[in-house]
Amino acid sequence: MKTKQKVQDRKDQQRNWLRSPLLRAFAALVLVFLIGIMFNADGAFFKWNTHRDMLRHISVFAILACGMTLVIIAAGIDLSVGSLLGLTAVLFSLFTLQKAWSPWLALPACLVIGAALGAASGRLIGRFKIQPFIATLAMMVFARGMAKWVSGGQKISTAVLQPDGTYQYVDVPPIFDFINSKVLNENLAVVTLILFACVLICWVILTKLRWGRYIYAIGGNEEAARLSGIPVIRTKLLTYGLCGFFCAIAGICQAAQELQGDPEAGMTYELTAIAIVVIGGTNLMGGRGGIGLTFIGAMTIGYLEKILSINAVGEASRLMLTGAIIIGAVLFQKTRR
């Protein structure tokens, strides 16, 4: 009997391992990588520049996904991340390009504004019990409108409008050049290093801090968490506030890469951020997931888009394929329950 029990326990362990989100996320990444090897565009996939550019391209989306991971683990959703990115991109460009602020002043100002707007969504959700979908949808519209109001509906660039109606071009601030530069003999973009720092921050929060345990508890069962003495309202406020903080970082990186602040920047970015989190394996119902899974999801999406790009696949086909992958990832989550 003991031998049969040991065999059954071993089978259960193997079955649980095969159902693990990490294994599934990694398997999806390996599958996409193998597709890249097969459809390598005459060897373009085997060049380091292709992988470096993929990391640089996906970094802004993955930074947004860092904040989205925290929110989804807490059984929430944030539809405003793209609009907050656009707003902070406009503000950062306005402060540095046209107002000539020091980056030591412009950077904290944008980060505080992003975190404050994110926390406002969290307060609406936690204190006033508004559904996350509705609260963040309202914030999405509000932040986009604010971006257009601040910019006058135009891109904030190095061309500064003068009182006489002419334009005077200003130099690009060094902070833009730094964020947009490459290090390690131009083998790695600075924006990718910023992504790594954001991933590390999320990892520390979710695995080392009490706040991270609160996020998982709220996502698993909010009422049980409240009865256990967990400060649900404060935790939601901090979670959405940190999501807004990551949006501000992504907006600053976006402005540096484009050398301007576009009030239309970030349109539909929230969909890509959600796709990254879901493909990584974080459960949309909350309570399960992790930032490591999100990073794997970002790599999967990044490689998929890069493979389609180097093989000259049209944008329409790329979008449809991404949508199909999201559905597949959600169905994958259902099969492991």
Image (tube, rainbow, N blue to C red):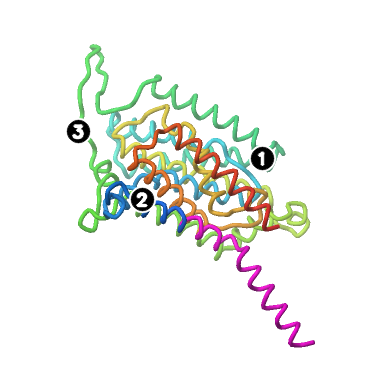
Determine crowd level at label 2: few under 14, some 14-19, many 20+ residues with C-alpha closer than 10 A. many
Instruction: Tell me, for residue 55, which label it has, or none.
Output: 2
Foreground: disc 3 or disc 2: 2
Farthest residue in the bottom direction? 2
Q: CA distance from mark 1 to mark 2?
A: 34 Å
Which residue is at the front of the view, 131 or 27?
Answer: 27
Dot 2 amino acid type: Leu
Residue appearing at x 28%, y 49% in the figure = 44
Asked whether the residues under the numbered discs 3 and 2 touch, taking CB atoms below 8 Å apart as contact, a structural biologist would say no
Does the segment drawn in magenta span residue 96? no
- Determine the residue positioned at 71% across, 83% down: 6
Cα distance, mark 3 to mark 2? 28 Å
Q: Position of residue 145 (x, y in %)?
A: 49, 24
Residue 314: which quarter of the image? top left
Q: Is residue 8 magenta?
A: yes
| Amino acid type, residue under disc 1 in the picture | Ile
> Residue 39 placed where, x, y %?
36, 49
User: Which of the labelled discs sits on residue 125, or is there none?
Assistant: 1
Check disc 1: other Cα within 10 Å, few if <14, some if 14-19, many if 20+: many
Tell me which label, 3 or 2, sits earlier in the chain. Answer: 2
* Residue ID for mark 3: 171
Of the numbered discs 1 and 2, the one sitting upstream in the chain is 2
- 100 up-or-down from 187: above or below: above
